[in-house]
Amino acid sequence: GNSVTQMEGPVTLSEEAFLTINCTYTATGYPSLFWYVQYPGEGLQLLLKATKADDKGSNKGFEATYRKETTSFHLEKGSVQVSDSAVYFCALTLTGGGNKLTFGTGTQLKVEL
Amino acid sequence: NAGVTQTPKFRVLKTGQSMTLLCAQDMNHEYMYWYRQDPGMGLRLIHYSVGEGTTAKGEVPDGYNVSRLKKQNFLLGLESAAPSQTSVYFCASSDGGTQYFGPGTRLLVL
């Protein structure tokens, strides 16, 4: 079956530090890949996505590149801010069958001054 | 546009009681989904719908029923609540691409 594995958190960083959250996947076929962010007390928001190999998704300074050879979609940001503190979810979907999302368990990020 | 809304925001139930969670979307999306979020387990799909009048089981459907009588609404029912159903429930909708999520319903079953 399909699955997504994320690094466990929490990840605690100082403001302006470099962020990497690892995500690897297993899928039958060629999935689309997503990063969603959940701020405290809120629902999930799409952060970025990539639909085919070597695509790079980017938004709000975050980036992730779809690496088919390593089945990975690691999230990076060059300089984090306190406002980036949230839970980050990696997810995949395959076309058809209801376009269901398979989520990783989430990684909590805490950014301190 | 309101996007995806969920009612209620919070509810406390006693074991054995029933309730219905309402999800509404104003984006004319065909697809709608119900997930539950539990600590350390991410989001797991309960049921989903690919169009008005259709429903299908997800990963963890037991103890839940759904209905999609109108395109804009997707209802999640608990016929006899159990403590194991204490969770945060999220609804989402999509046009086949990105899923858009509601703010969640926090349910506590005592």
Image: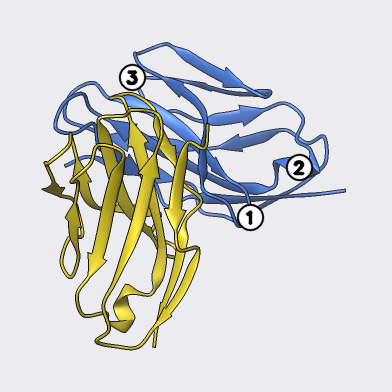
**Chain A colour?**
blue
CA gap between label 3 and label 1 equals 32 Å
Circle count: 3
Three-letter residue code for mark 3: Lys
Q: Residue at x 42, y 52 (%)?
A: A105
* Residue B59 point in image, percent of width and height: 19, 54
Camera-side mark, 3 or 1:
1
Pick the residue in front: B65 or A97.
B65
* Left or right relative to A52: residue A49: right
Residue B110 image offset from top left, x and y in percent: 39, 88
Q: Nearer the viewer, mark 3 or mark 2?
A: 2
| Subunit bearing disc 2 | A
Reading the chain from its start, which is encountered first: label 3 or label 1?
Answer: 1
Kindly identify which residue carries mark 1: A40
SS at circle 1: loop
Seen at 31% across and 29% down, the residue is B29
Residue highlighted by disc 3: A68
| SS at circle 2 | helix
Q: Amino acid at mark 2?
A: Ser
The answer to whether residue A72 shows anywhere in this view is: no
Residue A101 to residue B107: above or below: above
**Rendered image: mark on residue B87:** none
Name which residue lies at 40% across and 19% down.
A67
Could you tell me which residue is drawn at 51 percent across and 18 percent down?
A57
Chain label for disc 3: A
Circles 1, 2 touching at the beta carbon (< 8 Å): no
Distance of label 1 from label 2 (alpha carbons): 11 Å
Which chain appears yellow? B
Tag 1 and tag 2 share a subunit: yes
The residue where tag 2 is placed is A83
Could you tell me how far apart the alpha carbons at marks 3 and 2 are, in whole angstroms?
Answer: 31 Å
